[in-house]
Amino acid sequence: MSVTLRAPAADELPALQTLEAAARRRYAAWPDLAFVAGRPPIALERLAAGTVWVAEHAGRPAGFILLQPQDGQLYIANISVAPEAGGRGIGAALLAQALTGARTLGAEALTLTTFRAPPWNGPWFRRHGYTLMPAEHIRPTLRATLERQAITVVPATREVLWRPAE
């Protein structure tokens, strides 16, 4: 499958919101996480505040990744793939772009927070070289992210993963 990675056009951000909301619908089948499917789409402000890479296939967005520099690391704030495009390497291409970006920035690592259970969350990232992040590498901005997430999500369902940028 041919995928092109590119920056989004300014008027394309609402389409990425729609893509992200569609990608989250799969949580509806997981009783403990079904609430995720009904959350509002990612805020336009979040998309505009980070670095976004769009994976385009057949002339339209098939996925995207949102990256945010944090304390010498690069945080994966969101990665979403359109349901009809899943299993085609789009997410892997976006992760590869993120790793390149981390290296270009001189970041120590790529980091993220994710759910432990669904196969498209923690297990998927671990298959792509991510491991549990040692606590001593969790810096203040990521710690603040975890504290915000703990308000609406049970911390025991989450994990912090990383991949050193080397």
Image (spheres, helix red, strand yellow):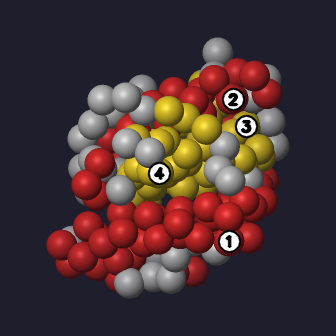
Determine crowd level at label 2: few under 14, some 14-19, many 20+ residues with C-alpha closer than 10 A: many
Q: Measuring 77% from the left and 46% from the top, which residue is drawn there?
A: 70
**Placement of the C terminus among the 4 image quadrants:** top right
Q: Earlier in the sequence, mark 2 or mark 1?
A: 1
Residue kind at label 3, given as amino acid type? Gln
Name the residue tied to disc 4.
61
Q: What SS does tag 3 mark?
A: strand
Residue kind at label 4, given as amino acid type? Pro
| Real-space CA distance between mark 3 and mark 1, rounded to the nearest whole angstrom | 23 Å
Instruction: Say whether marks 2 and 1 touch (CB < 8 Å).
Output: no
Label annotation for residue 73:
3
Tell us which disc is closer to us: 4 or 3: 4
> Which percent across, then down, holds residue 139?
74, 47
Tell us which disc is closer to us: 3 or 2: 2
Residue kind at label 2, given as amino acid type? Ala
> Which percent across, then down, holds residue 29?
18, 72
Q: What SS does tag 2 mark?
A: helix
- From this viewpoint, is residue 126 visible? no
Where is residue 127, by image quadrant?
Answer: top left
Can you name the residue that lies furthest to the top here? 166
Q: What SS does tag 4 mark?
A: strand
| Real-space CA distance between mark 2 and mark 4, rounded to the nearest whole angstrom | 23 Å
Q: Measuring 33% from the left and 33% from the top, which residue is drawn there?
A: 89
Where is residue 103, by image quadrant?
Answer: top right
Q: Is residue 162 left or right of residue 124?
A: right
Q: Earlier in the sequence, mark 3 or mark 1?
A: 1
Name the residue tied to disc 2.
102
Tell us which disc is closer to us: 2 or 4: 4
Q: Earlier in the sequence, mark 4 or mark 3?
A: 4
| Real-space CA distance between mark 4 and mark 3, rounded to the nearest whole angstrom | 27 Å
Name the residue tied to disc 1.
44
